Image (tube, rainbow, N blue to C red):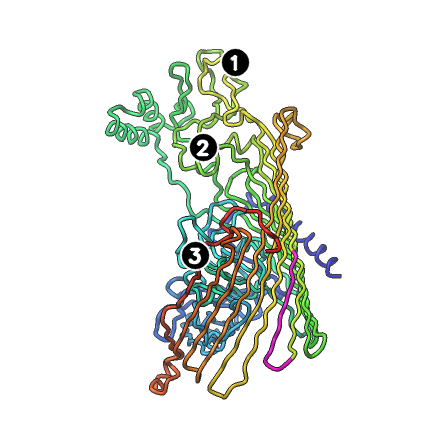
Amino acid sequence: MVAILFFVLSGGLMAQGQRLDRNLKNLTVPEQASIEKIEKSEPAAAFDVTVSGTVTDANGEPIPGATVSVPGTSIGTATDLDGKYSLTVPDGASLVFSFIGFESQTVEVGNRQTINISLAESTANLDEVVVVGYGTQQKVNLTGAVGVATSERLEGRPIANVAEGLQGVIPNLNIAPRNGDPSQSPAFNIRGFQSINGGSPLVLVDNVPMDLNRVNPNDIESVSVLKDAAAAAVYGARAAFGVILVTTKSGKAGKVNVSINSQFSLAKPIFNMDPVTDPHDFVNARNIANIRTNGVPSYDDDMVEGTRRWSENPIPENEWGVVDGNLRFYGFNNYQNDIMTTFAPTQQHDVTISGGSETSNYFVSFGHLNKDGYLDSDRNENFKRYNVLMKGEFKVNDWLTLDEKIVVNTQKSDKPYFYNWDVNINSLARVNPIMPIQFPDLPFYLQQGDREQYEQYIGMYFGGTNFFPYLEDGGRSTWTRNDIWLTQGATLTPVKGLTIKGNFSYNYNYRNSQDVASKIEIVSNNLLEANPISNGFSGNDFINEVNDINQYYVFNAYADYEFSLPEKHSLTAMVGFNQEWGQNKRVRAQANTLITPLITDLNATIGMQQTFGSSNHNSLRGGFFRVNYIFDERYLIESNGRYDGTSRFPTSDRFGFFPSLSVGWRISNENFMANTSSWLDELRSGPPTVRWVTNCWGIISTPTSLPWASGNPAL
């Protein structure tokens, strides 16, 4: 039934998406993207009350990003940087004001048009349980630096990946978009400190390493960022640049809950050129600059006069000229606006089904993302992602619980082939406003009556840094990735205070990529050439195909024990073992000279063919521990450590020990602070974390930044 429901819903949603794509160019689009969330059918309401106001904290400071919504509907907004909002709601509605770390407030609108709200900080957050390395802790008792974001920060937002949803959410988590490629996920950086070779944090999804770009944001329950040694030491050398822990959603006891979420959003490029639109101004400015640096102008008198003539009277007759047999363009090419789209559409559809009882629960999620790039062409970039998540938990008896998880992620990318750095979307900024783009349609060229001779070239693209011929007529770079994770886990509670957890995960990752560098034709502006047609940067046409097969195994086993001590003392200990190993096989084939660009198959070539292959394996093994001691809810001490080894290093330098020690003082719980409880929720202090590294300091470098190396898979 789940599969049938998924295919029925996805078929309808995909059809809807196709209609949206076909009609996108006919839409008048507002600057702000629209989001539509479908939870259940609602009767049409009369929107006749517009409410505005300001949301502040107890000190009167504005709260940007606070949520203002009508409960039970999809109507809502967020406050701006000044804490202000404006929302049109049905008559007789109520508003809910909420923000993370503050108590939510619900007020009736009535006949008011202005509602200002002051939110009080929530003391309940002090008892919040956050995910840390191989376990959880109360936020109030943390001595390490841990940042947390819950699912509420990701839901109902037009984001293509998790990174976009985390921007500006967790302090010291820096997220930088790489480029406009919709298949590229932003880069993560914690606290801005890296080695000279770069480095990125370790990302674990339910305790297994995974690329966050493959995860459906709608499936995430919480994200924890471990920023310092005290928090990240249990992950050893791989945690040199911090750790990002992602926990996915699980089922809960209760009735069956079905949620359907459909979003259509429009992304606007964050940067575009603002070129000089008057060619005469451009030519004069370049001449002045070149005379100052080289002593000679960049353009001759004919170019100056021709651009002046077009600027004063921009008609087709003044746009082109011929000098010494070469076509000259005197007008404005509007290149940047022609090649870049104003808005890039994104469609996202999610279906979740969850429920359970006292002894079992389940969570099933299906997701689809379709995101276009920023090229204004039918051959635009496109990225698709399909996600399936299935989780189940079964309580066998009082001391044994089993949990299973199946993850299937599929990604597809299709974009223009990268022929050369000079001809792609990145060269957009280097095309000047008077560069000729296409061969013109003129009454004559060199002399009266020669139009028929040059008619065959009309509409063809010129070369240089002109991206259009490679975009419209060139080859494509495509890849498909299928990523499957199977996890079996068990939790044992044999005695009071002792919890033993173990899980084994198997990953099969298959990626097929194909680069098709088909030939394109460009025309020269020299009308005297016997053969003005050339292939530009596409002189050698070929097909390059790569198949990667990765298999990865992860085993985790760890035990937590809470000691029974007198009331003022609290002591917990955790010890565990982690083993990971994987193997990779790559096969690459290249065939030259395509018979036709319409058939992109290795066999549809007549030139030289080459094959390549490689395989490798690697492994990781570590034992880890954590000890927490709390005295009288005031004095905190925590020690973490890991004895870590990896096959990526030579046998003699394969293992290292990475311990940490941190202490804290809950000053607000001291007797001399008793009178501050009415205005001070929590005040903690602690010295800097101490971290030792045994033997070689260089082993702290993240091993995943090194090339694959052969080694003993058993370690």
Labels 1 and 2: the sequence-earlier one: 2
Q: Does residue 532 appear in the picture of this structure?
A: yes
| Residue 183 vertical position relative to residue 201 in the rendered view, above or below | above
Labels 3 and 1: the sequence-earlier one: 1
Residue range in magenta is 495-506
Labels 2 and 3: the sequence-earlier one: 2
Residue annotated with mark 2: 422
Amino acid type at circle 2 is Asp
Real-space Cα distance between discs 3 and 1? Answer: 74 Å
Real-space Cα distance between discs 2 and 3? Answer: 44 Å
Amino acid type at circle 1 is Gln
The answer to whether 363 appears left or right of 704 in the picture is right
Residue 453, numbered label: 1
Q: Nearer the viewer, residue 579 or 103?
A: 579
Residue annotated with mark 3: 696
Q: Badges 3 and 1: C-beta atoms under 8 Å apart?
A: no
Label 3: how many Cα within 10 Å (few below 14, some 14–19, many 20+)? few
Q: In x, y percent, where is residue 705?
A: 49, 50
Q: Badges 1 and 2: C-beta atoms under 8 Å apart?
A: no
